[in-house]
Image (tube, rainbow, N blue to C red):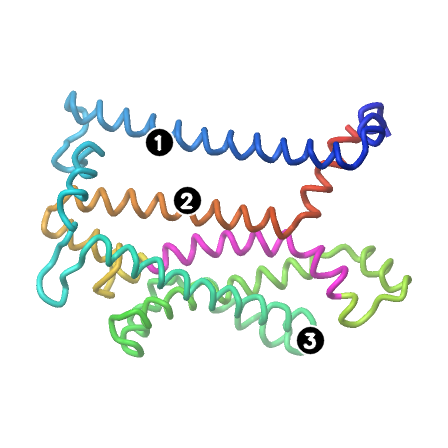
Amino acid sequence: MGLRSNLQIWRGPAALASDAAARRGRSHWRSLAGVLVAWIVLGTVWEVGARIGILNAAILPPPSQFIPYLIETSGSVGLGVNKVSYAAALVETVIRVGVGFGFGVGSGLIVGTLLSAIPWARVIGVPIAQILAPIAPIAWIPLAIVLFGTGDGAAVFVVFMGITASMSLATVAALGGVPGEYIKSARSLGSKGWRLWLRVILPAAAPGVATAIRLSFFAAWMSVLAGEMAGINSGLGSLVILGQQEFQMKLVMAGLVTIGILGFGFDRFLLLVRQRLLWWESRGARVVAADA
């Protein structure tokens, strides 16, 4: 161990915990500052481009135009049963992606774990998942509409089918990637059965599974938006399409910016959950840094 590691041990566990919390806090604020700077730069370039004529403000209205538009109006578009409002569309899309994502990830984790634990099931199940995984979520829309109509059920079904197979394969890969030395060492110490899975295999595979969950969210987010744009007559995707058809570009840009912000926010939330649940990852990183 190096001099820095010896000094850290001498300082005691309380000081190390305080340093770790301070590092996490600084990293959090740096990340937040980076996001704010990025949006400020993007907004400034957008505004300047629209004012000097580089960007067509009629097609790409800047924030100074579509934000007041949303505040002053309800952001409604369409007629009759096809009428969509901004607030209602936002809520519908978030609920749909949340329910579909939850069912899809949960099913993928269960199926992937069973395929990894049961050899004969893996022989049959993995090829089926490999056949379903490449099917684009938008390809499920006709079947979803036939089965569930054009409401929430169809959107949830599209999200579910869009991520379950890939999540199952990712789980199988993560569990299969656990180093054999871990399993041999645990068995030599008397760990077997569910204890081996709970104490060794699942913790070792958890980082890979967590990464697959984050990637599955992006697939779920794009799946529900594709469904709403292609036939499910509500939600943010439908709002954008109807706005384009009626040439309400302020509403279109508001919808696109909202989609980006929500997607980014949900991804940050999943990253935060990962950091809280997989606490041993950050501890291992601190140990490596201390020995450097």
Mark 3 touches mark 2? (CB < 8 Å) = no
Mark 3 touches mark 1? (CB < 8 Å) = no
Q: Quadrant of residue 171?
A: bottom right
Q: Amino acid at mark 3?
A: Ile
Q: Which residue is mark 2?
A: 264
Q: Nearer the viewer, mark 3 or mark 2?
A: 2
Q: Is residue 227 above or below residue 72?
A: below
Q: Nearer the viewer, residue 57 or 280?
A: 280
Q: Amino acid at mark 1?
A: Trp
Residue 39 tag number:
1
Magenta-tinted stretch: 197-224
Residue 124 located left or right of residue 68: right
Residue pictured at 53% horizontal, 73% vertical: 128
Q: Residues within 10 Å of mark 1 (few under 14, many from 20)?
A: few
- Location of residue 75 in the rendering, given as x and y in whole percent from the top left corner: 16, 50
Residue 118 tag number:
3
Q: Amino acid at mark 2?
A: Phe
Residue 219 magenta-highlighted: yes
Counting residues from the N terminus, which is met first, the one under dot 1 or under dot 2? 1
> Principal SS element in the magenta part?
helix
Image quadrant occupied by the C terminus: top right
Q: Residues within 10 Å of mark 3 (few under 14, many from 20)?
A: few
Q: Nearer the viewer, residue 273 or 59?
A: 273
**Mark 2 secondary-structure assignment:** helix
Q: Quadrant of residue 264?
A: top left
Residue 185 located left or right of residue 84: right
> How far apart in space, not on screen, are marks 3 and 2 (Cα)?
37 Å
**Mark 1 secondary-structure assignment:** helix
